[in-house]
């Protein structure tokens, strides 16, 4: 019955008469976003979506297309979201062509309007304020604007609506909706009519904005002669229920776009529902702020040939009132209608494919994209855009392919394209002639006039041939590299750095903010070309809390992707990234000609000394630079303080504006004049201020901005400079220091400088990639940072639009810090200065404050070993003292009187209950030793708390004793994640980010992969392991929701946790996670832990836990979602006071990591990543592990005393239970005694905002269970039919249909089997499921050994994810046309990321798979007939056989296992990432040939593959076309094992390597 319901049209899709119900009481706001308050900011809201398209290739309208689009929308309901009101969706809608017959009838019958012929009029749905006077004003405004363009208004109609099924939140904000009809003048072409309608709408929108809040709810869904959109704050089923028009039989169209929205909030927004005017978007634009800034600047020269002087009426070109999708839509409209570009060309321009590093790219395509890059930077981020202007309909995928898009083409010329297959369930397989997918960077386009699909290559050839792009690029582009080499050849600049550079003087180094640690710990290691690593996180204060001077860049924290979009791996997926960028004056964006590419190409933003010399002293092909001195008198700083610095910045900005006005193509901001009497304006302040001043003047795109500076040294300095507008940076002092150190180290200075440049450039890529940004052109000026401790005057002048929630210092403190550096450089009396050494990286007596002091560590270990409360109290006092100088919570005082009377300690919740709220951090076996890992588990089990496996898995032998970790982590590496692993958990934690390196993955070197670790992780001992960035199945909020669904299916008794890291916006992300049905959310501080990471990440990414925790708690309460989830705080918690503050800020549970490690003996040597821990805590070295002296009791003692300290505070505060204390920020206040000149400028009130005041009706902690919606799963329906066989160990076969809403099939049954049979499972094929149809996402998730699932049909994304010994077979329907069945290798059979994290078992797919096939496979055997990009990425074991072509970047990061690839054209090597693998012919080895043949024979037998049978029929010829892909590290270990075996040693590979 459920399957039948899924197959039939949802209620509202059938025909019915018009109806309308009386509206319920409503708000006067269509978007009821709360005001910015506390730490909540509505500007941070994000969304993701499901998208669909149904069309007729020949442009024939029909009722079936509209109904099928509605059905597709309903069957993607799980990709949308709803809040605490299940009848108020996040938004859904449909866009169709104008249904002329229908409109002609209803306009005549309902509004007495006689419509002209098709194409001679326009229509649009308009949202109006519910206030009658305001609604009339809005209508009058629009009518006036329409008439002003010379168009005739035919009249208004009220489309009937029915809100009876809408939830209260949707009804409260429901708008008045009216339809406007406008006649097309006979003299206007269809295209020009669209332009005039566009102008009319923009004029009306700007007019409404000018009239103020009364017309805020005026919104034009569409106003077009071609298309119309029906949308709202609706669930997918409600779209057709609400809009009666959509249910009418004569409402017909030749195409339809549909969209289902998943927002991170529960606040209704009718306008933000999609489709928009020209497109609908699944994804997120990560570079939006920079894109918007540049559009604003381009208004200065934007001029439309068509609109002429009216062009300015279209401004602004971007809006803060719109989402990223809305702004993208605005830009596309502008390019197409004002700029005259075809719609598809505009989309190609904004979302280009990865062209910079693609050696296979044809020159005509390279020239096209290079030209377009000169006009506009990419709108970077994961994106699947479906778009239409009525003439064309299509879709485009971002360069990374990070959104699913599958399509069918039928015999009767219909196309169904959507985020999933099977969304139009009634479609018969025999009607289908093609099953495909949209590939990364590719475009799918239907041209209704030509009546067919235009192939991506043909389409781009056609667009590129429209103009002589290659000729224009060759003639116009100048490259900085050419400029430099030309001037070097002419002798005008030096050919190379000096062979004997001298170390910059201490005067210069101190003035530029260098310390001894910078030289020794940061710069010197970069002579290897890599950034140095650190570990154990950061325990020094924020810049604003530090009593030491800090450079301005230290007041910024890098943002990173989590949940709503994914980071990128800049090493393994470097092919999609680029540092090159055109700079200098831009031409008119609304024109397209040779002037567009008269720009200077800079290959990377880190400029050499020679490049800066060329810029400063020479001219080349009309290019020259104007230099602006960024120094100012020291005397002015001493006398004028912040005013002097502000005045100097103002002078620099004025000089920059004057240079632009005079036509200077380039500006260089230089501090070379710094001296004893002249001090430099910090380069970041100068750069940011000039960038913002030029944007405000709309001239930023008229000039290139270069920086010649002494103070840029570490990667974060460069990232902030580029992020705030620099086109290029030359770190001249860093180069000199590198050269001088190189001479001492016996390295050529030029080599060291080049390596340093490489290291910094890669560091910038890494910073970009953690936010999911691929090109520096998009990153530049995108302001992907949060300021911490900068006041409004600094933000407004230098960093306009950046978030600085706690306010902070002004120019006076920045001047004082600059003077401290200067005074250290030039001491009084002319004495020689001492080189600065603050002890920022390692504790130094008298230096920078550290949270983990030697005295505190000794005190903690004494308390843990003696279990003496007096010793603990001494330790706690030291921690409180350290807190005051290093953390935000240290600035708070806890109220001890007034509001509630004290209660006797005997009445306070006992410590035995409090410790149950404690958990240890996620530290993997691999990052710490087995002894440490097990001690933590034993301790937490003894307490009744929870230990965490970390991402390294857990030995199944531990599941049955006190070494079992209650929390099993599921991270990007998926090491050891099997059905049995998931079954043996009380909590399953999804690791979205890690405090030490949010937005990044990690590596475990081979020497740490022992026999135990190899066994636990399902990999080969001695072979290094790579953890990908959190990416592959958690790259959007709806995909995270799917993983939560997967895990709940795999263990319905475990609570599902999601680990986030504190950053601005983590609150809205947490709200989205709660809506995605997580049971538990961890907010981790950016302090880090044992994980190794580059110092840039450790120091400059992630916010303090106090801010993230308070934001998450406030936002969840505000959304009415707090009652659904447990909120855990995790961030260097060390004492009972820390726990109390976290509870008062909203935490229910509390994570400890560093504290327990110190209790076990850690002495903070920060050598975890080197495997040289001297106390055996964080090492796999067998000799060092013998030095481990920790005992579980040490952790038990420590945490018990923490709980007792908590009880003491509770007694004083008047709380009898922990629950009473949660969220009571009224008991916290700022302690004035703990503030100094910098910290006193902070406004900590946003952290202390009462969440209860934001939503008095909301609970402050979890009070209800999430409804995971698994009760009606297909698994549960079929489980009774196989339960007896599983119990008895016998065989059984079950047949069933399957549809796309049947997700995670097999997980529940695998969970049942694992409970009965453990890791061993059952004999192969014991439990067989024979299914037919379209399988939903995650088919066969962690399918256990003994279960076999075969699907006749196809499957969606994540098929075989986590395969745990089972068998998965998918083959085409027997009803399909024979041509598809014969050529299955040309058609899609499964979606993206199939077999991700598979550990064992087999999979046979007769057809093609999408992107990222077999990622992190560690033991499964897979046979498939073609794969997309990134196949076998990070694979560590198993076998993968590809009987067809592959996409690009195959085997990136592959360290184990073997792949066999059919290479019929001999071109596979071009698409294979050769960094870690070698290729050979399978025919070279009899063993390989035999193994491969066995897999191909099995594939033929399991799937009936014609492809396999053809290969087997002529095997001797076929086998020679196969290439063997073997990882080099894996081959080395195999060779070592073979050598040992020959010697009779039998030692492990790990031991062999150590030896």
Image (spheres, grey):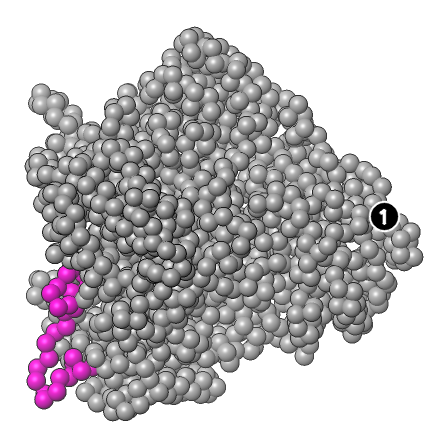
Q: How many marks?
A: 1
Is residue 1416 placed above or below 48 in the rendered structure? Answer: above
Q: Is residue 1065 left or right of residue 913?
A: right
Q: Residue at x 52, y 35 (%)?
A: 1268
Mark 1 burial class by Cα count in 10 Å: few <14, some 14-19, many 20+:
some
Is residue 508 placed above or below 1129 in the rendered structure? Answer: below
Q: Is residue 875 left or right of residue 68?
A: left
Q: Name the residue tied to disc 1.
A: 101
Q: Is residue 1119 left or right of residue 636?
A: right
Within the image, what quadrant is residue 1239 found in? bottom left
Can the viewer see residue 852 in this picture? yes
Q: Is residue 85 left or right of residue 1410?
A: right
Q: Residue at x 60, y 39 (%)?
A: 76
Q: Position of residue 607 (x, y in %)?
A: 30, 70
- State which quarter of the image contains the N terminus: top right
Q: Position of residue 488 (x, y in %)?
A: 26, 74
Q: Position of residue 1212 (x, y in %)?
A: 31, 54
Q: Is residue 825 magenta?
A: yes
Q: Position of residue 611 (x, y in %)?
A: 29, 73
Q: Residue at x 37, y 84 (%)?
A: 646
Q: Which residues are magenta?
A: 822-847
- State which quarter of the image contains the C terminus: top left
Nearer the observer, 1476 or 511: 511
Is residue 1076 placed above or below 616 in the rendered structure? Answer: above
Q: Secondary structure at mark 1?
A: helix
Nearer the observer, 924 or 1057: 1057
Within the image, what quadrant is residue 938 found in? top left
Q: Is residue 1156 magenta?
A: no
Nearer the observer, 228 or 979: 979
């Amino acid at each position: 019955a459920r399957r039948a319901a899924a197959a039939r049209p949802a209620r509202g899709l059938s025909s019915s008469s018009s109806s309308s119900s009386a509206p319920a009481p409503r708000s006067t706001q269509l978007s009821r976003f709360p005001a910015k308050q506390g730490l909540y900011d509505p500007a941070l809201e994000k969304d993701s979506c499901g998208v669909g398209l149904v069309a007729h290739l020949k442009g024939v309208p029909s009722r079936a297309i509209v109904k099928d689009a509605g059905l597709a929308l309903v069957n993607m309901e799980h990709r949308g979201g709803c809040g605490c009101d299940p009848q108020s969706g996040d938004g859904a809608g449909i866009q169709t062509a104008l249904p002329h017959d229908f409109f002609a009838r209803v306009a005549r019958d309902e509004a007495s309007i006689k419509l002209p012929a098709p194409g001679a009029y326009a229509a649009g749905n308009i949202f109006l304020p519910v206030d009658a006077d305001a609604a009339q004003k809005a209508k009058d405004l629009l009518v006036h604007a329409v008439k002003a363009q010379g168009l005739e208004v035919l009249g208004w109609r009220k489309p009937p609506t029915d809100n009876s099924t809408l939830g209260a939140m949707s009804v409260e904000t429901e708008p008045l909706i009216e339809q406007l009809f406008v006649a097309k003048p006979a003299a206007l072409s269809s295209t020009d009519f669209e332009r005039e309608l566009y102008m009319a709408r923009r004029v009306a929108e700007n007019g409404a904005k000018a009239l103020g809040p009364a017309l805020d709810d005026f919104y034009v869904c569409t106003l077009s002669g071609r298309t119309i959109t029906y949308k709202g704050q609706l669930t997918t089923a409600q779209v057709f229920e609400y809009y009666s028009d959509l249910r009418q039989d004569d409402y017909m169209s030749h195409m339809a776009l549909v969209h289902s929205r998943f927002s991170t909030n529960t606040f209704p927004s009718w306008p933000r529902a999609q489709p928009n005017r020209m497109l609908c978007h699944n994804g997120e634009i990560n570079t939006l702020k920079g894109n918007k800034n540049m559009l604003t600047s381009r208004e200065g020269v934007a001029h439309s040939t068509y609109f002429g002087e009216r062009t300015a009426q279209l401004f602004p070109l971007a809006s803060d009132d719109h989402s990223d999708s809305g702004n993208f839509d605005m830009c596309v409209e502008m390019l197409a209608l004002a700029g005259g570009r075809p719609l598809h060309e505009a989309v190609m321009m904004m979302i280009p494919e990865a062209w910079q590093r693609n050696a296979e790219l044809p020159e005509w395509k390279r020239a096209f994209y290079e030209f377009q890059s000169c006009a506009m930077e990419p709108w970077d981020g994961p994106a699947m855009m479906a778009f239409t202007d009525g003439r064309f309909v299509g879709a485009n995928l971002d360069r990374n392919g990070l959104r699913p898009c599958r399509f069918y083409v039928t015999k009767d010329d219909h196309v169904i394209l959507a985020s999933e297959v099977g969304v139009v369930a009634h479609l018969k397989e025999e009607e289908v002639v093609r099953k495909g997918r949209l590939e990364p960077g590719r475009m799918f386009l239907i041209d209704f006039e030509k009546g067919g699909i235009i192939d991506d290559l043909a389409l781009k050839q056609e667009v590129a041939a429209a103009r002589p792009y290659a000729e224009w690029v060759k003639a116009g582009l100048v490259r900085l590299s050419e400029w430099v080499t030309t001037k070097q050849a002419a002798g005008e600049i030096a050919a190379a750095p000096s062979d004997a550079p001298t170390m910059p003087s201490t005067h210069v180094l101190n003035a530029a903010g260098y310390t001894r640690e910078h030289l020794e710990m940061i710069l010197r290691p970069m002579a290897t070309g890599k950034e140095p690593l650190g570990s154990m996180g950061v325990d020094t204060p924020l810049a604003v809390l530090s009593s030491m001077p800090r450079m301005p860049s230290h007041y910024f924290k890098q943002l990173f992707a989590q949940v709503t979009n994914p980071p990128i791996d800049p090493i393994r997926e470097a092919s999609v990234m680029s540092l090159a960028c055109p700079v200098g004056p831009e031409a008119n964006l609304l024109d397209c000609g040779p002037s567009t590419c008269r720009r200077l190409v800079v290959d990377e933003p880190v400029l050499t000394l020679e490049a800066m010399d060329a810029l400063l002293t020479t001219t080349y092909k009309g290019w020259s630079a104007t230099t602006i001195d960024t120094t100012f008198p020291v005397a002015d700083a001493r006398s004028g303080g912040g005013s002097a610095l502000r005045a100097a910045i103002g002078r620099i900005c004025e000089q920059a504006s004057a240079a632009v006005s005079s036509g200077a193509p380039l500006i260089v901001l230089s501090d070379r004049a710094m001296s004893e009497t002249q001090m430099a304006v910090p380069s970041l302040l100068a750069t940011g201020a000039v960038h913002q001043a030029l944007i405000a003047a709309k001239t930023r795109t008229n000039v290139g901005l270069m920086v010649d500076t002494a103070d840029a040294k570490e990667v974060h300095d460069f990232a902030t400079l580029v992020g705030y507008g620099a086109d290029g940076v030359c770190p001249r002092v860093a180069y000199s220091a590198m050269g001088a150190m190189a001479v001492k180290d016996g390295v050529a200075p030029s080599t060291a400088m080049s390596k340093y440049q490489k290291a910094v450039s890669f560091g910038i890529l890494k910073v970009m990639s953690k936010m999911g940004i691929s090109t520096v052109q998009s990153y530049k000026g995108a302001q992907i940072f949060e300021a911490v401790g900068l006041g409004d005057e600094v933000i407004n002048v230098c960093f306009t639009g950046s978030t600085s929630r706690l306010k902070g210092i002004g120019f006076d403190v920045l001047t004082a810090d600059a003077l401290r550096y200067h005074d250290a450089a030039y001491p009084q009396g002319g004495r020689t200065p001492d080189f600065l050494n603050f002890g920022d990286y390692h504790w130094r007596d008298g230096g920078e404050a550290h949270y983990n002091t030697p005295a505190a560590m000794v005190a903690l270990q004494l308390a843990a070993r003696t279990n003496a409360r007096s010793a603990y109290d001494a330790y706690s006092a030291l921690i409180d003292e350290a807190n005051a100088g290093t953390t935000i919570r240290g600035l708070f005082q806890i109220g001890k009187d007034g509001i509630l009377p004290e209660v006797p300690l005997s009445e306070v919740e006992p410590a035995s209950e409090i410790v149950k709220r404690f958990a240890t951090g996620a530290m993997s076996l691999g990052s710490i030793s087995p002894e440490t890992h097990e001690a933590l588990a034993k301790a937490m089990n003894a307490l009744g708390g929870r230990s965490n496996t970390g991402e390294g898995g857990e030995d199944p032998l531990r599941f049955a004793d006190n070494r079992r970790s209650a929390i099993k982590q599921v991270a990007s590496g998926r090491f050891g994640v099997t059905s049995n692993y998931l079954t043996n958990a009380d909590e399953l934690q999804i690791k979205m980010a890690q405090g030490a390196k949010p937005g990044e993955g990690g590596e475990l070197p081979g020497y740490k992969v022992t026999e135990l670790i190899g066994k636990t992780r399902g990999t080969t001992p001695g072979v290094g392991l790579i953890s990908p960035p959190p990416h592959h199945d958690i790259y959007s909020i709806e995909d995270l929701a799917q993983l939560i669904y997967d895990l709940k299916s795999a263990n319905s008794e475990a609570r599902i946790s999601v680990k986030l890291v504190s950053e601005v916006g983590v609150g809205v992300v947490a709200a989205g996670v709660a809506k995605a049905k997580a049971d538990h959310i961890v907010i981790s501080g950016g302090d880090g832990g044992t994980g190794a990471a580059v110092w840039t990440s450790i120091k400059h990414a992630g916010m303090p836990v106090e801010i993230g925790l308070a934001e998450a708690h406030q936002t969840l309460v505000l959304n009415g979602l707090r009652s659904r989830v447990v909120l855990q705080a995790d961030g260097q918690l060390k004492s009972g006071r820390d726990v109390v503050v976290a509870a008062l800020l909203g935490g229910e549970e509390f994570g400890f990591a560093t504290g327990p490690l110190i209790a076990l003996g850690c002495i903070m040597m920060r050598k975890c990543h080197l495997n040289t821990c001297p106390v055996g805590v964080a090492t796999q070295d067998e000799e060092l592990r013998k030095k481990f002296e920790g005992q579980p009791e040490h952790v038990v003692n420590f945490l018990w005393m923490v709980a007792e300290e908590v009880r003491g505070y509770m007694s004083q505060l008047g709380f009898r239970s922990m629950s009473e204390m949660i969220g009571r920020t009224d008991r916290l206040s700022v302690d004035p005694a703990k503030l100094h000149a910098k910290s006193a400028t902070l406004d900590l009130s946003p952290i202390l905002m009462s969440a209860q005041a934001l939503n008095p009706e909301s609970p402050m902690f979890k009070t209800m269970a999430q409804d995971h919606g698994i009760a009606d799963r297909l698994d549960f329906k079929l489980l009774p039919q196989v339960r007896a066989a599983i119990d008895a160990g016998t065989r059984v076969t079950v047949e069933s249909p399957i549809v796309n809403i049947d997700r995670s099939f097999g997980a529940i049954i695998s969970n049942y089997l694992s409970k009965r049979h453990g890791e061993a499972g059952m004999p192969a094929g014991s439990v067989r499921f024979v299914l037919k149809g379209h399988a939903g996402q995650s088919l066969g998730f962690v399918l256990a050994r003994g279960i076999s699932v075969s699907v006749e049909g196809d499957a969606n994304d994540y098929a075989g994810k986590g395969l745990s010994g089972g068998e998965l077979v998918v083959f085409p329907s027997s009803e399909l046309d024979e041509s598809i069945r014969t050529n299955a290798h040309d058609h899609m059979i499964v979606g993206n990321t199939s077999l991700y994290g598979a550990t064992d078992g087999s999979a046979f797919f007769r057809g093609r798979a999408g992107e990222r096939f077999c990622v992190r496979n560690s033991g499964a055997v897979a046979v498939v007939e073609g794969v997309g990009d990134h196949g076998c990425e990070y694979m560590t074991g198993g076998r993968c056989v590809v009987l067809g072509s592959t996409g690009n970047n195959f085997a990136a990061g592959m360290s184990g296992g073997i792949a066999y690839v059919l290479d019929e054209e001999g071109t596979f090597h071009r698409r294979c990432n050769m960094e870690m693998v070698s290729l050979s012919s399978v025919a070279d080895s009899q063993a390989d040939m035999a193994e491969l043949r066995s897999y191909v024979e099995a594939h033929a037998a399991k799937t009936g593959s014609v492809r396999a049978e053809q290969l087997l029929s002529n095997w001797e010829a076929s086998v020679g076309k196969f290439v063997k892909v073997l990882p080099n590290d894996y081959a080395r270990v195999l060779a070592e094992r073979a050598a040992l075996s020959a010697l009779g040693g039998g030692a492990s590979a790990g031991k062999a390597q150590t030896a």
